Amino acid sequence: MTRNDSGVIAVLDEVTALIPVLRKSGIDAEERRWIPDENIELLEKAGVFRLAVPRRFGGLGVPVADQAAVLNEIARADSATGWVSMIWVSSSWAPSLFPEQAQEEVYAAGAVRVSTGFTPSGTLTAGGTDADADDSVAGSPRNYTLDGSWKWISGSRGADWAMLAALLTGPHGTPVPYAVLVPFSALSVTDDWHASAGVGTGSCTVTAAGVTVPAHRVLPLADLLAGGDYAFVPYFMAQGAAAYIGMAKGAYERFIERLPGRGITYTSWTDQSRSPLTQIQVAVAANKIEAADALQERWLRRLQEHADSGTQPDLAERAAARGRAAYAVQLAKEAVDELFEAGGASVILRDEPLQRFHRDIRGLSLHALFTFTTNQEVHGRAILGLAPDTPFL
């Protein structure tokens, strides 16, 4: 944590104080398939959704490691709230890569919640629906029309803005992916999120039907991925890993909390903590979480060094960021698996937070950008001097 920034310390302290409230909300979030409004209000008041907003717009604009520390703490309390907060915070930095007019619109309130969809399942058409939409400045359209649907948009039921990928047919007939900023008031959200993991994340389908988008809120996806102060994909990977590691810490704490008075059924062990097997299991879990934290800390430091010096990671570093973040996620998942296996049959009850951490970290680790094997392949190709074979670096 950055000790010379009392505002950041205050956010972390407030979030830590909220852990009991957030932890109790897990069942409610699963029943309504969306985190409680109270969670959002409390985190908003704590300043969480100002973390990545540039300072000139009233945000905190804090270093990435400080952002990750807060997200880690939220996920330690509740996996769904942690995941949604991670999406909103990590995505709220990206509008700073758009033209100034777009930034002023998105950051008008000083705090903002942005949900993203980077699968280009929408289409852009030059020219809006208003009377002068066909006018142009220096050959560029003033407006575009956005159509399409995007599945699995985490946080869609409480976001202010969406950043969505869509294809625009270029002059030679080749579709080019763009990132588009749209207020959620212009979109429709389908209540279709029925899942066995990440149940409370409200990752619903979002649809745009003939939505007019001004040109200043449309940016080539390649420009977005190139990044600004931070390289976008490594930044997002680091934030995501923070949420997964936080889930593992929450599961670990819950396992330790449950131990007193527990025996191992159908054995002579009346105190599970006395069993060498349990001792090994808890040590393995603890060390995997510690290793994930160490791996994450190293990359966060390197990412901030680039931001502070105004440089960008090269392709090898970007590939390494994906490989290392995914490895940290894998370690966190394995730690929770270890604890779940040691938890006894009662761990499967719905009111037991440990089973929710287990389901959520397993399900959310299937997210395409965090998949273990895919990211190790990207990293391995870079190590061996091969092209990364993906633009998402």
Image (cartoon, rainbow, N blue to C red):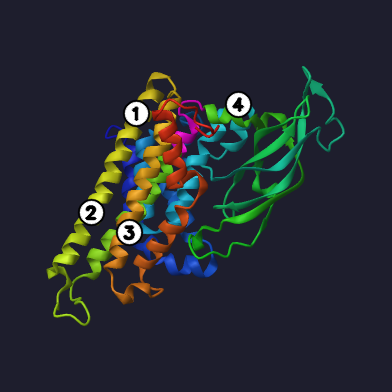
Q: Residues within 10 Å of mark 4 (few under 14, many from 20)?
A: few
Spatial separation of the CA atoms under disc 4 and disc 3: 43 Å
User: Is residue 201 or residue 248 the one in the foreground?
Assistant: 248
What is the span of residues highlighted in magenta in the rendered image? 227-236
Which residue occupies the extreme top position in the image?
138
Going by the numbered disc 3, the residue's amino acid type is Val
The structure residue drawn at horizontal position 49% and vertical position 31%, both measured from the top left corner, is: 388
Instruction: From the image, tell me which residue sits under label 3.
Output: 336
Q: Residues within 10 Å of mark 2 (few under 14, many from 20)?
A: many
Mark identifier at residue 100: 4
The structure residue drawn at horizontal position 44% and vertical position 22%, both measured from the top left corner, is: 312
Describe the element under mark 4 as helix, strand or loop. Answer: helix
Q: Position of residue 370 (x, y in %)?
A: 46, 46
Q: Earlier in the sequence, mark 4 or mark 3?
A: 4
Mark identifier at residue 302: 1
Judged by depth in the image, the label closer to the viewer, 4 or 1, is: 1
Let me know if residue 235 is in the magenta part. yes
Q: Earlier in the sequence, mark 1 or mark 3?
A: 1
Judged by depth in the image, the label closer to the viewer, 4 or 2, is: 2
Describe the element under mark 2 as helix, strand or loop. Answer: helix
Q: Earlier in the sequence, mark 2 or mark 3?
A: 2
Determine whether 355 is above or below 102 in the image. Answer: below
Describe the element under mark 3 as helix, strand or loop. Answer: helix
Instruction: From the image, tell me which residue sits under label 2.
Output: 286
Going by the numbered disc 4, the residue's amino acid type is Glu
Q: Is residue 22 left or right of residue 203?
A: left
Q: Check the picture and name the quadrant holding the N terminus.
A: top left
Spatial separation of the CA atoms under disc 1 and disc 3: 28 Å
